Image (tube, rainbow, N blue to C red):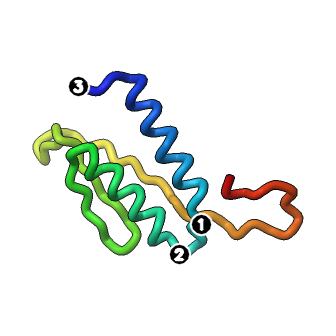
């Protein structure tokens, strides 16, 4: 079983990868791939529909109540006024 420290570190690395990867609206192919691969490495079986990733817990049962977590992974394009690289 993974320790909390490992889970936190892996989650931070995923977030860093997502920040470095442009994902403007309708152009989320690369961030969807990162998310999909993250869950595959965890031994889960993500379902990809376009750029949407669906993942069921290994404890999922259609006979139990279900909690659905939903999030976006697209961003707006940075403007020319940025003083720092928004992807770093």
Residue 32, horizontal then vertical, whole percent:
42, 64
The residue to which callout 3 is attached is 1
Residue 14, horizontal then vertical, whole percent:
47, 47
**Mark 3 surroundings: few (<14), some (14-19) or many (≥20) residues within 10 A:** few
Residue 21, horizontal then vertical, whole percent:
56, 62
Disc with the residue nearer the chain's start (3 vs 2): 3
Q: Are marks 3 and 1 in contact (CB under 8 Å)?
A: no
The residue to which callout 1 is attached is 22
Q: Are marks 2 and 1 in contact (CB under 8 Å)?
A: yes
Q: Nearer the viewer, mark 2 or mark 1?
A: 1
Placement of 76 over or under 27, stated as above or below: above
The residue under the point 38% across, 23% down is 4
Disc with the residue nearer the chain's start (3 vs 1): 3
In the rendered image, the quadrant that contains the N terminus is: top left
Give the secondary structure at mark 3.
Answer: loop
Q: Which mark is residue 12?
A: none
């Amino acid at each position: 079983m993974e320790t909390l420290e490992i889970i936190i570190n892996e989650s931070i690395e995923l977030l860093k990868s997502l920040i470095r990867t442009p994902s403007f609206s309708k152009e989320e192919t690369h961030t969807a791939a990162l998310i999909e691969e993250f869950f595959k490495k965890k031994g889960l079986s993500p379902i990809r529909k376009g750029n949407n990733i669906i993942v069921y817990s290994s404890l999922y049962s259609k006979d139990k109540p279900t909690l659905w977590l939903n999030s976006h992974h697209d961003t707006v394009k940075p403007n020319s006024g940025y003083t720092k690289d928004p992807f770093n």
